[in-house]
Amino acid sequence: MINIYVPCDSTALSVGADDVVLELILQADRRGEDINIIRNGSWGMAYLECLLEVEVDGVRIAYGPALPEDVTSLFDAGFLGGGDHELCQGVTQEIPYLKNQERLTFVRCGLASPLDIDAYIGNSGYRGLQNSLKMPPQAIVDEVSNSGLRGRGGAAFPTGIKWNTALGAAVAQKYICCNADEGDSGTFADRILMECDPFTLIEGMSIAGLAVGADQGYIYLRSEYPLCKIMLEKAFKIARDRGYLGQNICGTDFSFDIEIRMGAGSYVCGEETAMLNSLEGRRGVVRAKPPLPAIEGLFGLPTVVNNVLSLASVPIIMDKGGDYYKDFGIGRSKGTIPFQIAGNIKRGGLVEKAFGVTLPELIYDFGGGTMTEKPLKAVQVGGPLGSYIRSDGLDLPMDYEKFTEAGAVLGHGGIVVFDETADMSAQAEFAFDFCAVESCGKCTPCRIGAVRGEEVIAKIRAGENVEENWHLALDLCDLMEAGSLCAMGGMTPFPVKSAMEFFPEDFTDDPKILASEPKGFSDKNMPCAPKETM
């Protein structure tokens, strides 16, 4: 019997993976071939989906991107034996896009069926939890602190500090909340991990519960991710049946369980306190801090709030140690981060690399440049609230501190590429429009400022009192940065001001504007650091 691997994640499904499977079965039946189809997770090479892999003498040979109509010619070319075909990519692990990554968090994505717990355990799964069960809580927290793990979002807050604060709270009931409301443009790492390796997240949340003394976890899941919900709930049941979730985990006195709560489509609920309000059944608006969630969070009790990538990085830390993990990266940015390359790009997908890799390496070496083959104009990193980076300013290491110094934000690792045809004034207007739609409405600078900002940019684009409205837009940005309650309003000016500084010709042909520099951004200092992870 010949094993054929076909991904089952949303990306593969969207390009016809199920139809490819049906065609594989039909063709194999007609030709008398004995095949075994395994619906594995995705390797993250979105540009090659639907990616077929055939196991030949223990080695997996990749073919893609395959459509249902390609299956006949694949059989004719003898792909079951690794035969040559125009879609053949060679040995999967030797594809440069995959081979040149440093996979720690996503090491198991693509290897096997996402719900095959034996394959998970056989590939180092649950070793981190087993090690943690033999350690006192403080030692677990110290190991995570030593690793240098930080939140994989706007604020990049040290994970160990959150855990230590919650551990020190002397109350019986505590919670672990996973923020899976992945809403940034160009981001999909959370989705891939939950769909393709859900046990990693379950293990990470379980270790967090053990570390701080929590017995209940919640995953706040983006409503647009229905397949994640299905995968996670199936994985919960499997983990409970095998003793890795629920009561008396692995025969110990530690109990921990997880439930899913679906989001309602609000971008601002990516902010931790708005998420907690939503979890409690309230309107998703930002809370004032203090108190911090680690002291007074869900239902007024100590709560650790981490996103998917932070929690999913914990198992390898507790398996191989904090020293091993922090050996990757540069400066204070330790470990790896999955960069998600999207937009006008030839080879879009997920690339897990250690901090320190540069944008040109990601965009050109991995991404292959723009899809249109036109010159690159701008790159937005960190979601819709991230600054635009000009093509001549790309040689910047992917590092939290270096990005902050440059007036940009690394965020969740999303990278959206624009070629020379992009109108950056339209992008600036969109940033204000996005904030106006997604604002929770609690604070005036964000609620009103976004609406007025959209109006002012529209007037500039229409040539109406350009110089006056130009400075009005900058003043409004300064007000939103300094006065907004959370990063929704505080960071909306980043894409606006960067577009105005780097691409003034897209807004106007006024020589006074073209000769000037916007106040407050050109010094490359971030006026208002992100207050929390969005």
Image (cartoon, rainbow, N blue to C red):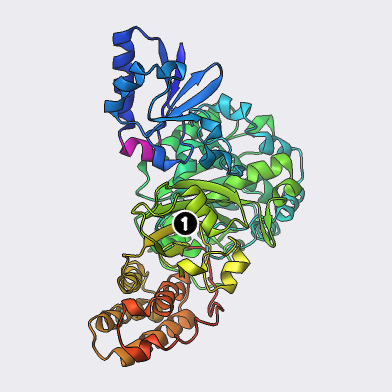
228 relative to 303, above or below: above
Residue 481 visible in the current orientation: yes
39 relative to 499, above or below: above
Q: Main secondary structure of the magenta part?
A: helix
Dot 1 amino acid type: Gly
128 relative to 431, above or below: above
Residue closer to the observer: 79 or 342? 79
How many discs mark residues in the rendered view? 1
Give yes or no for residue 313 being in the magenta stretch: no
x, y percent for residue 300 = 54, 62
Residue closer to the observer: 375 or 328? 375
Q: Residue at x 45, y 60 (%)?
A: 270
249 relative to 27, above or below: below
Give yes or no for residue 12 being in the magenta stretch: yes
Residue closer to the observer: 497 or 115? 497
Residue 400: name its quadrant: bottom right
x, y percent for residue 147 = 71, 52
Residue 282 visible in the current orientation: no
x, y percent for residue 381 = 47, 62
Q: Circle 1 is placed at which residue position?
A: 414
Residue at the top extreme?
A: 32
Label 1 CA crowd tier, 10 Å (few <14, some 14–19, many 20+): many
Task: Identify the element where label 1 is drawn.
Answer: strand
Q: Which residues are magenta?
A: 9-15
